[in-house]
Image (spheres, rainbow, N blue to C red):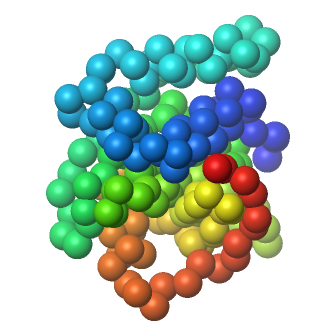
Amino acid sequence: MKEPRPHAMQAKYLLAQMALQDVGRFFATFGASGDLDYLGNLWDAIGQQVPSDQQIPCDGIGTFHSDPDGIPDHIVICFPAPETRNEAYFLAAVKQDDVARVFCLEKSENPITRQETTVVSEFAKHGRANWGDGGAASAKEFIDHVAAIIGDSDAQPISFIPMNFA
């Protein structure tokens, strides 16, 4: 697989950081009562920071809302279709007691078989957790998977990489 596109990666990390820094503002901005054009405008503004031949149109960008059992307030952001590993299909911000848990469903590749797959990652203020196989690239299946992680007090990620999102 080729390297991830900077536009897609910058957008994923910026949105994760926004949710982690101020979940209330994130929900006000991207929730049902937010400005419907803001996400597309933000995507385009991020694209202005990369060369024009690396900009990704905002086709497919938007939000998804569902009501799975066992998950508190959440917003799922849908990204343009990823082309390579580490690019995200979706980012979910889940609000628990005015704190965000932020998950992504990312395109990945099995290191042994080289077959395309997905992985669920979680961003926290001090790092990135890998929750393993994410299943189908479906917003509904993704948020159900996130609900299962949140609902299992014994759940542990496969790995954790220290990073600074604060």
Q: Quadrant of residue 56?
A: top right
Apparent side of residue 67 relative to residue 31 in the rendered image (left or right)? left
User: Where is 66 relative to 151, above or below?
Assistant: above
Whether residue 30 is visible to the viewer of this picture, yes or no, is no
Pick the residue in front: 57 or 112.
57
Query: Which residue is depicted at the point 44% across and 19% down?
Result: 40
Residue 62 percent coordinates (x, y): 37, 30
Q: Is residue 127 visible?
A: yes
Residue 137 spot, x, y in % from top left:
45, 52
Q: Nearer the viewer, residue 165 or 103?
A: 165
- Residue 123, image x and y in percent? 59, 58
Residue found at x 30% / y 52%:
74
Q: Residue at point 40% right, 87% down?
A: 153
Nearest the viewer among 113 and 7 is 7
Task: From this view, report whether residue 108 is shown above or below residue 146.
Answer: above
Seen as rendered, the residue at the extreme bottom is 154
> At 18% from the left edge and 57% from the top edge, which residue is drawn?
67
Number of marks present in the image shown: 0
Give the left or right position of residue 22, taking residue 131 as reference: left
The x and y percentages for residue 113 are: 75, 69
